[in-house]
Amino acid sequence: SFTARFRMSDRFTGREDLPNRSTVMSRHLDKLDRLAATCDTPIILTCQIAANPDSYGANQTIYGGSLMHHMVNFVIFMKARKGALSQLEIRNHPEEENQEFQIQITEDGVGTP
């Protein structure tokens, strides 16, 4: 998880550290962006979900907040369902509308149910 290293770090322990954390995260994301452009390859990040103390309805958010939403091209939320099923929701894709669908993850790979 990209965000786990920041969330678990002793450097960023409270809300007063948010500006510094955002600066450090932004530097890492900029480097990844340059790497993707140089190598002409996508970069896939996994992120942790955290409780949103300022929420008005949406009680969970991506750890890293608005920085992550501004720096990535689109977001895929994945929720475990019954058995091997998972529900995926694609949000903010630049060329597609938001979508939801289910996949099945087994020892043989990933597919549709």
Image: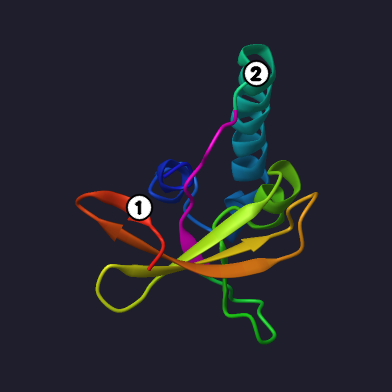
Q: Residue at x 53, y 69 (%)?
A: 101
Check the image and name the residue furthest to the right.
95
Mark 1, Cα crowd under 10 Å, few <14 / some 14-19 / many 20+, is few
Tell which of 1 and 105 is nearer to you. Answer: 105
The boundaries of the magenta stretch are 42-50
Q: Secondary structure at mark 2?
A: loop
Determine whether label 1 and label 2 are within 8 Å by CB. no
Vertical order, 96 against 101 (above or below): above
Q: Which residue is mark 2?
A: 40
Q: Is residue 72 left or right of residue 6?
A: right
Q: In the image, which disc is placed on residue 110? A: 1
Task: Where is residue 20? Give x, y as percent.
Answer: 63, 41
Q: Secondary structure at mark 1?
A: strand
Q: Which amino acid type is shown beneath numbered disc 1?
A: Val
Task: Where is residue 73? Give x, y as percent.
Answer: 71, 44
The mark nearer the N terminus, 1 or 2, is 2
Structure colour scheme: rainbow
Q: Residue at x 47, y 41 (%)?
A: 2
Task: Where is residue 65? Give x, y as percent.
Answer: 65, 57
Question: Is the magenta region chiefly helix, strand or loop?
Answer: loop
Q: Is residue 92 in the magenta section?
A: no
Check the image and name the residue furthest to the left.
107
Q: Which amino acid type is shown beneath numbered disc 2?
A: Asp
Mark 2, Cα crowd under 10 Å, few <14 / some 14-19 / many 20+, is few
